[in-house]
Amino acid sequence: MTTITFYALYQSIVEYAATGKIVIGEILVKTEFPFKGLSKLITYLMIVSVIAWYCVTKLGSDKVKDVSPALRSILQLIILAIVVVSLYEFVYNFVVWSSMITLNALGGSINLDNISIPYPNPQTPWNLVFATKMSLAAFLISAHGFYIISRKGKT
């Protein structure tokens, strides 16, 4: 996960130095590993993020047992808010991405990976493949976190 992140940061800095522009997540979507035609780095990053979270919760699940009920309730509310926001972001990004694919298909070209949205800042657009996959990972992680904190309160 760290290697993928540092690679993307380095390549983004190189691209920004060369062109003066950056599309967030574009490097991760364009780079295929270990050879062309296989998975993209964004797919690996999403999977590794979810697996790393699962491993962390397995290693530290005993710590949740010692949390007071008041703190557990506060954490549940915070995590629930993160679940709702990440689900909203996932659905929003997926709908925008699907709409842009349809718009491009009607225009005669289909290129799933180069679709970006200049939101929230027009100077730094976001690649929609990156945004969709990472918001899905955030939703899965936060939903699992909510499950863990809620389950520990009942045992």
Image (cartoon, rainbow, N blue to C red):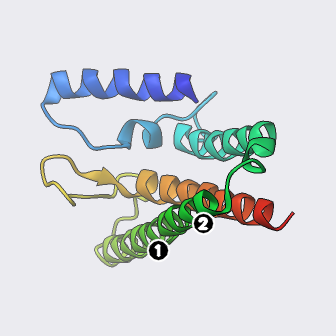
Q: Measuring 31% from the left and 29% from the top, which residue is drawn there?
A: 12
Screen quadrant of the N terminus: top right
**Image position of 14 with respect to 38: above or below:** above
Q: Secondary structure at mark 1?
A: helix
**Image position of 116 with respect to 4: above or below:** below
As rendered, which of 47 and 35 lies closer to the eye?
47
Q: Measuring 41% from the left and 29% from the top, which residue is drawn there?
A: 8
**Label 1 or label 2, whichever comes before in sequence order:** 2
Spot occupied by residue 124 in the image (x, y as percentages of width and height): 19, 46
Residue farthest right in this picture: 155
As rendered, which of 112 and 153 lies closer to the eye?
153
Mark 2 neighbour class, 10 Å CA radius: few under 14, some 14 to 19, many 20 or more: some
Query: For the residue marked with disc 1, what is the amino acid?
Result: Val
Mark 1 neighbour class, 10 Å CA radius: few under 14, some 14 to 19, many 20 or more: some
As rendered, which of 39 and 105 lies closer to the eye?
39
Spot occupied by residue 4 in the image (x, y as percentages of width and height): 52, 28
Spot occupied by residue 71 in the image (x, y as percentages of width and height): 59, 57
Q: Which residue is mark 1?
A: 91
As rendered, which of 137 and 34 lies closer to the eye?
137
Query: For the residue marked with disc 2, what is the amino acid?
Result: Ser
Mark 1 vs mark 2: in front: 2
Quadrant in the rendering for residue 112: bottom left
Give me the C-alpha separation between circle 1 and circle 2: 27 Å
Q: Measuring 47% from the left and 29% from the top, which residue is drawn there?
A: 5
Quadrant in the rendering for residue 40: top right
Spot occupied by residue 21 in the image (x, y as percentages of width and height): 16, 37
Q: Which residue is mark 2?
A: 73
